[in-house]
Amino acid sequence: MIIAIGSDHAGFSLKEVLKKHLEEKGYQVNDKGTHDTNSCHYPVYAKAVCQSVLSGESEMGILVCGTGIGMSIAANKMKGIRAAALSDCFTAEATRMHNNANVLCLGERTVGPGLACKLADIFLETGFQGGRHQTRLDMITEMENE
Ligand code: RB5
């Protein structure tokens, strides 16, 4: 599976940890930056990762900022993106099963590296359940198209 990953300066260190973890697990990782801890603007990286997912270049996206929240707000502005900012295992599984989330947003200031890797594993390994959940996603797609 090909994963697009991106962060701002506040998420850079955790992005590097996640990238190494995912590569060791056999994922191909498209790193869309940032590439250092110089102050930058998270919407730039949210857009780059989401474009990679929407174009099919990557199957899933992971975004890291200080809290994961700025990244999720920006990512969810893009049609077809279902981004989830989370910090617990139950939600990581549920957002894949029920929301078919395609972008995981994490906060370097709120989640430690061990938990972040676990959350990424759960997110990437859990499938969408479809059925009544697809009906609800279709309603969201309709909202996007209004
Ligand atoms: C950067 O200081 C911080 O605001 C950003 O990484 C993010 O947490 C915003 O939601």
Image: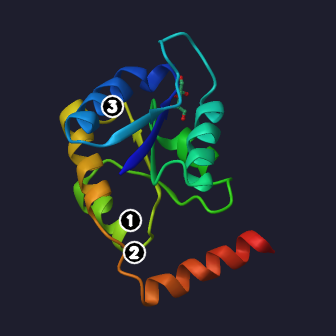
Q: Secondary structure at mark 3?
A: helix
Instruction: Pick whichever of labels 1 and 3 is earlier in the sequence.
Output: 3
Q: Is residue 75 left or right of residue 105?
A: right
x then y, percent, for residue 103? 47, 52
- The label on residue 82 is none
Mark 2 and mark 3 residues within 8 Å of each other at the beta carbon:
no
Instruction: Pick whichever of labels 2 and 3 is earlier in the sequence.
Output: 3
In the picture of the structure, the residue carrying the numbered disc 2 is: 98
x then y, percent, for residue 140? 63, 75
In three-dimensional space, the C-alpha distance between marks 1 and 3, rounded to whole angstroms, equals 21 Å
Q: Is residue 37 left or right of residue 16?
A: right
Q: Is residue 42 left or right of residue 99?
A: right
Res 3 quadrant in image: top left
Placement of the C terminus among the 4 image quadrants: bottom right
In three-dimensional space, the C-alpha distance between marks 2 and 3, rounded to whole angstroms, equals 26 Å
Residue in the picture at 59% in, 33% down:
45
Q: Residues within 10 Å of mark 3 (few under 14, many from 20)?
A: many
- Give the residue type at disc 2: His
In the picture of the structure, the residue carrying the numbered disc 1 is: 95
- Give the residue type at disc 1: Thr
Relative to 139, is 114 above or below? above
Q: Secondary structure at mark 2?
A: loop
Residue in the picture at 39% in, 40% down:
106
Q: Is residue 127 left or right of residue 72?
A: left
In the picture of the structure, the residue carrying the numbered disc 3 is: 19
Residue in the picture at 30% in, 33% down:
18
Q: Secondary structure at mark 1?
A: helix
In three-dimensional space, the C-alpha distance between marks 2 and 1, rounded to whole angstroms, equals 5 Å
Q: Residue extending furthest right? A: 146
Viewer-side label of 2, 3: 3
